[in-house]
Image (spheres, rainbow, N blue to C red):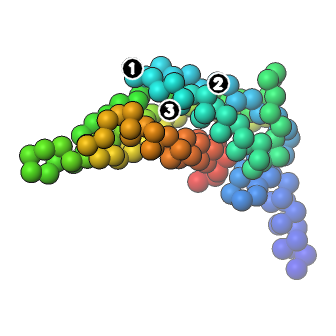
Amino acid sequence: MGILLGLLFIQGTCRYSMKDVSIEPDARTVKVNYIENRARYVNPLLSPRLTDKLRQKIVNQTRLSQTNGEADYEISGVVTDYSVSTSGISNQQVAQNNLNVTVSIAFRNRVDPKRNFESSITRNFPFASSKSLPQAEAELNEQIINNLTDEIFNKIFSNW
C-alpha cells in the first residue's frame, strides 16, 4: 500500500492532468495569438471565430489564465488552406464536394521548451455539389469551428 501511495505521489508531481488535459505544474498563463487567414480564399468569419473559440475552450477546460503579455504557453496559428475539391461522382456528375481547411499551429512552451512544436491540422467537410460555397459555409461554419478547435486543443494538451 505504501509503495502504491509513493508511486501516486511521484506521478502526481510530474504533471497536472484532468480530463486527458496535460499541463506542467508550473504553467499558469496562456496567450492565444490571433489565428491569421492566409489561404487563397478567405472566409472572413473563420479566423476571429476560431481564435475566440480556442481561447474560450482553454480557459474553460484548463486552469490556465489568458494573458496578452508573455505567457507560459503561447499558441499561434495560420489558416493556410481553405479550398473546395470534388469528393464524389455519380452518373458522370459531381455528387459531393469537400471543403478542405488546414490550420498550421505553433506551440511555444516556456516552462518546458522541449515540448515546443509546429504542426498542421487538415480537416475535410463534405457538402452536396448542388450547394454553392456560401451555402455550404453557412451550414458548416459551426462544425468547422468546433472540429478545428477540438483538434488544436487536443494536439496541445493531450498526451496521445
On the image, the x and y values in percent for residue 143 come to: 50, 47
Q: Which mark is residue 103?
A: 3
Question: Horizontally, is 22 left or right of 125 in the view?
Answer: right
Q: Which quadrant of the view contains residue 100?
A: top left
**Is 154 placed left or right of 8 in the picture?**
left
Relative to 61, 136 lies left or right = left
Amino acid bearing label 2: Tyr
Please tell me in which quadrant of the rendered image residue 125 appears.
Answer: top left
Give the camera-side residue of 18 and 2.
18
For marks 3 and 1, the one nearer the N-term is 1
Q: Nearer the viewer, residue 44 or 39?
A: 44
Residue 67, image x and y in percent? 81, 28
Percent across and percent down for residue 85 are 28, 36
Residue at the spot of label 1: 40
Name which of mark 2 and mark 1 comes first in the sequence: 2
Q: CA distance from mark 3 to mark 2?
A: 12 Å
Q: Position of residue 40 (x, y in %)?
A: 39, 20
- Which disc, if any, is residue 34? 2
What element does badge 3 sit on? Answer: strand
Q: On the rendered structure, is 148 left or right of 25?
A: left
Where disc 1 sits, the SS reads loop
| Disc on the earlier residue, 3 or 2 | 2
Q: Is residue 8 something one can see in this rendering? A: yes
Please give the name of the residue rendered at 35% of the width and 34% of the height, measured from the top-left corner: 133
- Secondary structure state at the residue bearing disc 2: loop
Q: Tell me which amino acid carries mark 1.
A: Arg
Q: Residues within 10 Å of mark 3 (few under 14, many from 20)?
A: many
Q: Is residue 110 visible?
A: no
Residue found at x 51% / y 24%: 44
Residue at the image position 76 percent from the left and 55 percent from the top: 17
Closer to viewer: mark 3 or mark 1: 1
| Residue at image location 87% in from the left, 63% down from the top | 9
